[in-house]
Amino acid sequence: MSKVTKTVNRELRAVRPVSLGELASPARLVPADTPLADIDRTFRAERGLRSIVVHDGNRFALLSREHVEYTLTGRLGYGRGLHVRSTAAQMMSANSFSLPGHLELGHAAQRILTLPEESRYRDVLVLTDSGPGVVSVSQLFERLSADFRYAALHDSLTGLANRRQLEERGSTFTAADLAGVAVLFIDLDGFKAVNDTFGHRAGDEVLVGFADRLRGLMRPADVLARLGGDEFAALLVNVTEAQALDVANRVVLHAAAPFASDGHSLHLSASVGVSMAVDVVDELELSQLDALLRHADGAMIKAKKSGKRQVARLDGKGAAPITRNALIRRRLAAAFESETFALNYQPQLNLVTGECTAVEALLRWHDKVLGEVSPAEFIPIFELSGDIHRIGEWVIDQACAQARRWLDAGEPRSIAINVSPLQLAARTVVPQVLAALATHRVPPGLLQVEITEGSEITDLPRAIGQLQALRDAGLSIALDDYGTGYSSLAMLRDLPLTTVKIDKTFIDTIENSPQDALLVGGVIDTAHALGLRVTAEGVERAGQLHLLRAMGCDTAQGYLISRPVPAHLVPAVQSCVSEGC
């Protein structure tokens, strides 16, 4: 890791506790010879005090309000009389649970989850060089959830926002807000030559250094993101066209200054594309930020073609991606009649048995005019038009029909189907699923419903009711893309789940990022403690699969195992491992 990268990571560490000692609060200490009656009076006087720490020389033990009250009450109400001469020392257990302050939060959570259930939710005694501290279990897991959320929304190398965070911010804009919004699409010229000549370490130093330069050009209200590789984007708010162009020109100027790396002076430049709301006035009903990004991307390509190291606008030309979206909306109307939709199936590998007895059904659309159309393009349009209910019912029926065919062939497989929050809100999912299962005579255990954590569930109680009805009918329920949405722990607690699917974002880096590996291991342990199975998404390398097995992950899904394929190309149940896993 480069010095610059380490500096960025230290800055992130400074504002986000990573060890148990950093998270713990100083403890209230009392000597071991303190009368128990005095401790009782202290708790009565300070209603917010949850626990104290008893010390006897170098020995420490946590004494909770709950334990003191239980001891002094006694079964027959004579506790205070029986303990009138008792001291704190008599309350100290030889098996008092404590953890060292240097322990990372994920490791601490794993240790806590190994405790008996009756002890798992108590405060934890933390021993540090500066003295004992106390941390609540809820505080620890809330911090882990926040860290997981932070990692999902930030680039691990530069600490900038990532594309997901940029999209989330853009989704909050109304048409009125866009009047003062600009997007800069920034690409470093000559970056590949740096990697090829000086190595990826030098390349990382350049990216981190360039990110620092970009930070200095932005205001607090702006969003600066790394999209991947040497591509960056800036979302500028409350700016005029002249102000946006000025920022873009300063980006070009700052990129031209040499970057220092291991005694070398590296010279690069930047090409910047700029888009304003006026560029996408006809596309606001589809996707505000996506349209701006696409225009800015097209403008950046124009800048590169014009000689690089400059700023460009499309000026109404080169908007083919935006035109494609309008054509998608028109072609969707005829898609059902032309029967151009199809389901592909991506196998899931059971990491214990080595079999592929489960698949995920993925909707595909091949149009004779548009060619292959991504679900990311047409699903949002379906949700806007209300056709999501129609296509959702079709997917349920087709999946159940395929489950029947596999059952008849003697190779039963469970099939996971994705469900939109709009389907849950409309209360159409339960009757549609039960009807399809009955029509095709499919056991409910062969169907799994997946909901996406990042999806906006506007009526959570209603959604929970729908999912619970499916669970009661014998189906399994999976939370997809775990770690990328809001209130992760609340989702695990509130929804009637059977499975958690960890997002590909985290699986991508577990081989070379101890932090991400720790987070993934913590999620697996937490899910298992709650009685849930865990599926890892996006597994593409054998090293990832090896680590996931070691972590106790239940199933894995990704290109290493199989790409999504038509039903007749799905590998046999027993053949997954032999085909590359």
Image (cartoon, rainbow, N blue to C red):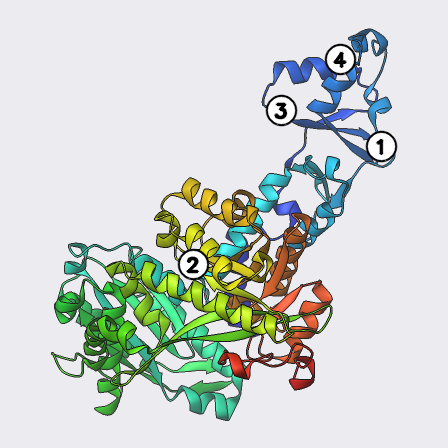
Question: Which residue is more in the foreground, 270 or 304?
Answer: 304
Q: Residues within 10 Å of mark 1 (few under 14, many from 20)?
A: few
- SS of the residue under disc 2: loop
Residue drawn at 80 percent across, 15 percent down: 35
Residue drawn at 18 percent across, 80 percent down: 319
Compared with residue 532, is residue 226 higher up or lower down, i.e. above or below?
A: below
Mark closer to the observer (2, 1)? 2
Residue 413 at x, y = what percent? 60, 69
Q: Earlier in the sequence, mark 3 or mark 4?
A: 3
Q: Earlier in the sequence, mark 2 or mark 3?
A: 3
Q: Residues within 10 Å of mark 3 (few under 14, many from 20)?
A: few
Q: Earlier in the sequence, mark 2 or mark 1?
A: 1
Mark closer to the observer (4, 2)? 2
Assess whether mark 3 and mark 1 are in contact (beta carbons under 8 angstroms): no
Residue 558 at x, y = what percent? 56, 75
Compared with residue 516, is residue 562 higher up or lower down, i.e. above or below?
A: below
Taking the image as drawn, is residue 105 in sight?
A: no
Question: Which residue is more in the foreground, 142 or 496?
Answer: 496
Q: CA distance from mark 2 to mark 3?
A: 46 Å
Q: Which mark is residue 49?
A: 3
Q: Earlier in the sequence, mark 1 or mark 3?
A: 3
Pointer 2 residue: 419
Left or right placement of residue 484 versus residue 41 in this view: left
Pointer 4 residue: 73
Q: Quadrant of residue 557?
A: bottom right
Pointer 1 residue: 57
Residue 486 at x, y = what percent? 45, 51
Residue drawn at 36 percent across, 71 percent down: 375
Compared with residue 117, is residue 106 higher up or lower down, i.e. above or below?
A: below
